[in-house]
Amino acid sequence: RRIDPPPPRTPATMKLAIASFYLALSASSAFAFSTAPAFVVGPAASAAASTTSLPMSTAEASSTDVAESDGAPKSKKEGRLRMMKNPQFFRKGFKEVRGDVESVMDGEYKSQLVDEMKGNEFKIERDGVTVYLAKDFGFCWGVERSIALAYEAVKHYPDRTVHITNELIHNPEVNDKLQAMNVQFIEKLGEGKKDFDTVGDGDVVILPAFGASYEEMDHFDKKNVDVVDTTCPWVSKVWNTVDMHQKKGLTSVIHGKYAHEETVATVSFCEDYIVVKDMKEAQMVTDYITKGGDREAFLEYFKNAVSEGFDPDTMLKKVGLANQTTMYKKETRAIGQMLQKGMMEKYGPKDVG
């Protein structure tokens, strides 16, 4: 399926000359993807249950961007959307510093040599030596956007203390530049905890490209701080997908690494979930679906990768699939197909919607 590129780059979108949107199409894609539904639902307890399908995390699987009701949030998604309405929550950057930031980023990330290589079939020859450039060299669009928003935040708040809840992206050079700008990286205390006591009244907090957990967002929503959200839009689309799973009564099977910042954020928006890192772990889940097994051994193996109170005997009867967007998209598709076949083997094609 073709992935459409983002809107034309303008100063407002903070272009980077070396960044390539089509990195999304590479094996290390940082974008969620769409595919035909994989049908992996358990036996039909009702007509409605038999027609539920397993949706992949996708940029198309989104719903409204703003919660309409004024009562207490009915879901974490609705709670997040309400936080985004807070006048101290910023996700579109700061126009008054955008031109300056674009110049800075062009100076730091633009390369005449790279431009020359891209214009010469991604290679250059010097003194009989040929050097090749990867066709997907550069930042993906979501990362490019996050860097621009973080730089804008620093310039917009010159007299305020600016914090960030994690590395902006997994790139030492980018994170070192933020530290050089005096951005304070919130200390990790272990066991998933962080030292938020360093964030004072009136400070600024940047949420990184991977996103932040619902609990972290809620914590800062209740404080007098400005929040600059640089979360990649493709990551938040996955959050919409797991919210849809909840509404359909599905357990979310997440293809990702349970300790990765993005997956930590994603599972915080789930109710029932299990995280599988690769085909081997997906096969373990599929085998349990089709054959059952040693419940205690299964839970021991996945003890860090399941929701609290997870019961594989009841929670793997109806499942939906989502992914950490930095995982190989081909592998996520293969996991979906594996789960689909497992469900069909267990319940038969008639009872799989």
Image (cartoon, rainbow, N blue to C red):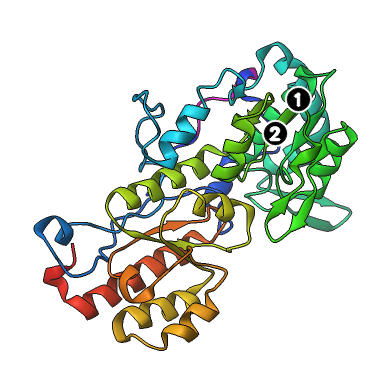
What secondary structure prevails in the magenta region? loop
307 to the left or right of 219: left
- Gap between marks 1 and 2 measured at Cα: 15 Å
Mark 1 residue type: Asp
Label 1: which residue? 201
Label 2: few (<14), some (14–19) or many (≥20) C-alpha neighbours in 10 Å: many
**Snapshot quadrant of residue 164:** top right
Quadrant (top left, top right, bottom left, bottom right) of the C terminus: bottom left
Q: Is residue 7 magenta?
A: yes
Q: Residue 206's mark?
A: 2
Determine the secondary structure under disc 1: loop
State which tag comes first along the sequence, 1 or 2: 1
Camera-side residue of 133 and 243: 243
User: Is 190 in front, or is 173?
Assistant: 190
- In the image, the segment drawn in magenta is 6-11
The amino acid sitting under disc 2 is Ile
Placement of 31 over or under 223, stated as above or below: below
Taking the spot 63% from the left edge, 41% from the top edge, the residue there is 209
* Residue 108 placement: quadrant: top right
- Give coordinates of residue 105: x percent, y percent: 77, 29
- Reply above or below: 280 against 49: below
**Left or right: 166 as drawn, with respect to 283:** right
- Which residue sits furthest top? 96
Q: Position of residue 125 (x, y in %)?
A: 80, 51
SS at badge 2: strand
Left or right placement of residue 233 versus residue 290 in this view: right
Q: Residue at x 46, y 84 (%)?
A: 296
Residue 337 spot, x, y in % from top left: 34, 69
Q: Are marks 1 and 2 in contact (CB under 8 Å)?
A: no
| Residue at the image position 58 percent from the left and 47 percent from the top | 23
- Residue 131 is one of the magenta-drawn residues: no
